[in-house]
Image (cartoon, rainbow, N blue to C red):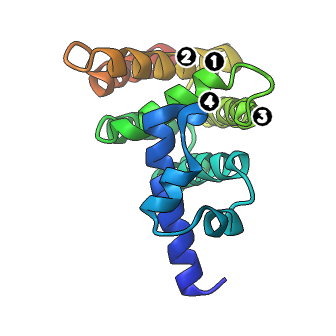
Amino acid sequence: MSRRGYARRDRILAVALQEFAENGYRGASLARIAERVELSQAGLLHHFKSKELLLVAVLDYRDEVDTQRFDIEVASGAEMLKRMVEVVEYNSRVPGLVQLFSVISGEAVTGDHPGHEWARERYRRLRGWVGDALRKGIAAGEFRADIDTEAHADRLIAMMDGLQTQWLIDPERVDMAAVFRGYVDDLIAALRP
């Protein structure tokens, strides 16, 4: 793909991300996306063969950017947990992205939703990263050996997702980043030997 092709693809992904964030998958319109990127709907479908494939590309793109931005995959122990705090702090500055994730996650609970497999795989991957980071923390002597890494990974992800939902509903009341930072600080202290 040419530089121009990549630029167009990135523009489509950015506009589609906004459209899905504002309207959810079912309410999003390929015609509106095409119009906003100054393409015909056929031109848009040349780049992404279906609405389903465009959604998956947008979700993958968002996850890839976050993973690279915060170097999440390679961090371990307390460093991984602190990087997750950085992700939440970043998310508090981009409510449209958080809304996209929340809307798509809510819609994707049904097995026939095109984002269903993406959501399942995303949670598996995230649980794996957190669990691996905690196990590396144990191996390095950073955390106690008796901790249940899988349970802590599930709790951490649930806290992150729950705070996002509460923050979207009542941003004046819920300081998502501060609450998550406090939770992670308490968790790190509780896991120490």
Q: Residue at x 34, y 25 (%)?
A: 181
The mark nearer the N terminus, 4 or 1, is: 4
In this rendering, the label closer to the viewer, 1 or 3: 3
The answer to whether the residues at label 3 and label 4 have Cβ atoms under 8 Å apart is no
List the residue tagged with mark 1.
154
Q: Residue at x 61, y 48 (%)?
A: 73
User: Compared to 97, does 67 lie above or below?
Assistant: below
Q: Which mark is residue 134?
A: 4
Q: Amino acid at mark 1?
A: Asp
Which image quarter is the N terminus in?
bottom right
In this rendering, the label closer to the viewer, 3 or 4: 3
Q: Position of residue 103 (x, y in %)?
A: 52, 27
Judged left or right of residue 189, residue 24 is right
The mark nearer the N terminus, 2 or 3, is: 3
Residue 138 picture quarter: top right
The answer to whether residue 73 of the structure is visible from this angle is: yes
List the residue tagged with mark 2.
158
List the residue tagged with mark 3.
117
Q: Amino acid at mark 3?
A: Glu
The mark nearer the N terminus, 1 or 3, is: 3
How far apart marks 1 and 2 lie (CA) works out to 6 Å
Q: Could you say which is closer to the camera, residue 158 or residue 40?
A: 40
